Amino acid sequence: MTQVFQFTPSATQNFTFQPVLDGALYTITLTFPAYSQRYYLDISDTNGTLIAHLPVLGSPSPASMGGAPSGTSPLFWDPIAKLVNFITPPPFTALPGWSSQFSALVGTTQLLSITGCSPDAYNGIYECLIGQDWATYAMSADPGAVTAVGQVGPALNILHGYFTTSTMVFLSDSQQFVVTP
């Protein structure tokens, strides 16, 4: 289950939270060294052993989903394929063969953040297959009829290379850490 931690900066103390990563509990402490003028996170196991010291990289602001024909939703669940499909926001200029919205080669996957959709089951961080003007991600259960379409944007996995299955994304706009265990 996705874990969300609201970041609350403080001038007097470090921010700490405890997510489950790859099935184990870890402690993450954010520091703001005066020399670097940016946040770093220290990941420690339950014994206090430092696992990693990494910069906090914020994911870019998401864009509104759109571009669907009138009377249809740009976001829908396919009950046969067990996939959520969505039309990406209006495209930017792209190289031939590249997805214009996500700067990823068509036919590859990219970690994306889906927010602001209703029902909430559509929201989260997903590994998405990228098309020219669409993307899709797996979802085994019907999330329900779309009542509100939200935003989509690239999700930068801060933990890439450190954990096998877990991801952690810092959403700059909402000041939230979103962790998939």
Image: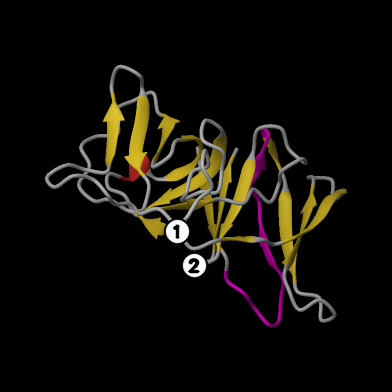
Q: Residues within 10 Å of mark 1 (few under 14, many from 20)?
A: many
- SS for callout 1: loop
Looking at the image, tell me whether mark 2 or mark 1 is earlier in sequence order: 1
Q: Amino acid at mark 2?
A: Asp
**Along the line of sight, which residue is nearer the eye, 34 or 94?**
94
Q: Is residue 85 left or right of residue 105?
A: left
Report the residue that reaches farthest toward the front.
Answer: 96
* Dominant secondary structure, magenta: loop
Q: Residue at x 39, y 42 (%)?
A: 133
Q: Are marks 2 and 1 in contact (CB under 8 Å)?
A: yes
Q: Which mark is residue 62?
A: 1
Q: Position of residue 38 (x, y in %)?
A: 73, 73
Report the residue that reaches farthest toward the right.
Answer: 49
The residue indicated by pointer 2 is 173
Image height of 96 relative to 36, above or below? above
Image height of 10 relative to 63, above or below? below
Residue range in magenta is 8-23
**Along the line of sight, which residue is nearer the eye, 82 or 24?**
82
Q: Position of residue 177 (x, y in %)?
A: 57, 56
Question: Which image quarter: residue 160?
Answer: top right
Verify whether residue 122 appears in magenta.
Answer: no
Q: Residue at x 73, y 52 (%)?
A: 27
Q: Residue at x 53, y 51 (%)?
A: 154
Q: Quadrant of the C terminus?
A: top right
How many numbered markers are drawn?
2
Q: Residue at x 49, y 43 (%)?
A: 99
- SS for callout 2: loop
Q: Is residue 176 left or right of residue 117?
A: right
Measure the alpha-carbon separation of dots 2 and 1: 9 Å
Q: Which mark is residue 3?
A: none
